[in-house]
Image (cartoon, grey):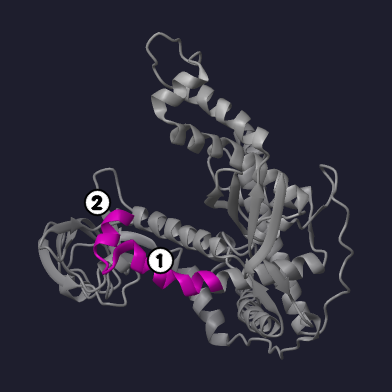
Amino acid sequence: MKTQFEKTGECLGTLTIEAEPTAIESAMKRAARHLSQHATIPGFRKGKAPYAVMVTQFGEQAVFDEAVEILGPELYRKALDEHAISPARAGTLEEVVSREPLVMRFSVPLAPEVEPGAYREVRVPFEEPPVEEEQVERVLESLRQSQALLAPVDRPAAPGDILLAKISANIVTADGKTEPIPVGGKGDDDGAVEVELNENLGGRFPGCGPKLEGIRAGESHEVDFSYPDTFPVERLRSKAAHMQFNCLAVKERRVPEWSEDIVRAVSDQTTVEELRVAVREALQAQARAEAEQGYAREVLDKMIAGGSVRFPQVLVQEEIERMLRTLESNLQREGATLEVYLKTRPGGREALEKEYDPQARERLVRGLFLGEVAEREGLQVSEEQIAERFRQTFAGMPGGSDDARSRQALKDPTLRRLLLEDLLNEKAVHRIVEIGQGRAPDPAPIPIPAEKGETSAVSPDDVEHLGGHHDPP
């Protein structure tokens, strides 16, 4: 076998392979046997028809094509080893250059190339975010409101009341048809739901609240409205809608005054002052975490500007496919499908993929750069940390993280990879923040691959996926 490798583009190479004559002869016979196992040849049992009969039956070209399908991957793998190439993804047979001798040309997507430059020298000022007393009081009031009791009242509904109602709503599509709108919300077995009488009825029906003020239990109203073009649910934007609202009960909120019992009901504290201090500390921690996310993005942008990231186009397409799967999941939760959604968009899937392309490239650049930093900093994830993240993730699910089935699920390689990605991403973002503030520790040495149960280092696969399933800052 003769091979030649040439780098032909950004993270793209061409591998040319000339097979030995005996290799293609053997492959042709294997191909004929394979075809005979899946064909009915009169006078022969499956898999027993002679080579000459199969060539006559299917034609030499068909047998040759099958032989290439068999031999090509084998020679491709051997050629990769010969040239010590670690492709980013599977290669593609671009063409059969000649039959005699058999010469095949493969396109090889090469591993991403990340040069982080002097990333450890990047500095960005960081200001501690303030927490206003007004924010503390809003949280305290929300906690007090959470202890309100709902009491039925025999009067017209007023803003702030809770209405128990049966609601049906739909939108009018471009072709004049109607599609139901999922109502959602807390309800009962009869399909009734509770909604707060505010401007948008809990955010689901914009502008409908004022039109229902004064409704009483037992009354029904029909309301026409429209969704704004900025509505969070994309398929509802700018759509005309109609709602049938059957009010079953009107309830008012009766909010208690602060007492030690109320404080204990909403916290681990005893007095209102202790609760106020705890709320302020929690708000400060939350504000800092949110500020650090934006700060980490700013630091990462400066790091990327001082380095370079290259990757094959196949990774861009994979990222776009992940984005489309996320969109499909979101649509399914709203009772829609990706197929229907694409029909409503000019250009369909092709146009949407083109629209996603810049975002996919940005995600890849950020993820791959962040992964390179994680590897250079020697960031590690232990088995104990993976198990703890698993417990945190599944603690609130049926059976909990200690359930036997849940413990078995932890052995699933896909789940383990996702948990590992989360932890690596968090560690890398935290290190980015430390570097930007000039307080990062020296990089840890990258350890030799650990035995099971010991600390695990960042692997190339783990780094690659940091730019995929989980968004970098």
Labelled pair 1, 2 in contact (Cβ < 8 Å): no
Query: Of the residues under marks 1 and 2, which one precedes in the sequence?
Result: 2
Mark 2 lies on residue: 192
Q: Which quadrant would residue 168 be assigned to in this image?
A: bottom left
Mark 1 lies on residue: 353
Q: Which is more foreground, mark 1 or mark 2?
A: 1
Vertical relation: 49 (above or below) 224: above
Instruction: Give the residues drawn in magenta, as a range.
Output: 337-361
* Label 2 SS: loop
Q: Is residue 346 magenta?
A: yes
454 left or right of 125 in image: right
Q: Position of residue 220 (x, y in %)?
A: 11, 60
Residue 119: tell me if it is visible.
yes
Q: Position of residue 66 (x, y in %)?
A: 50, 34
Q: Which quadrant would residue 412 be assigned to in this image?
A: top right
Q: Is residue 116 magenta?
A: no
**For the residue carrying disc 2, how many other residues have a C-alpha within 10 Å: few (<14), some (14-19), or many (20+)?**
some
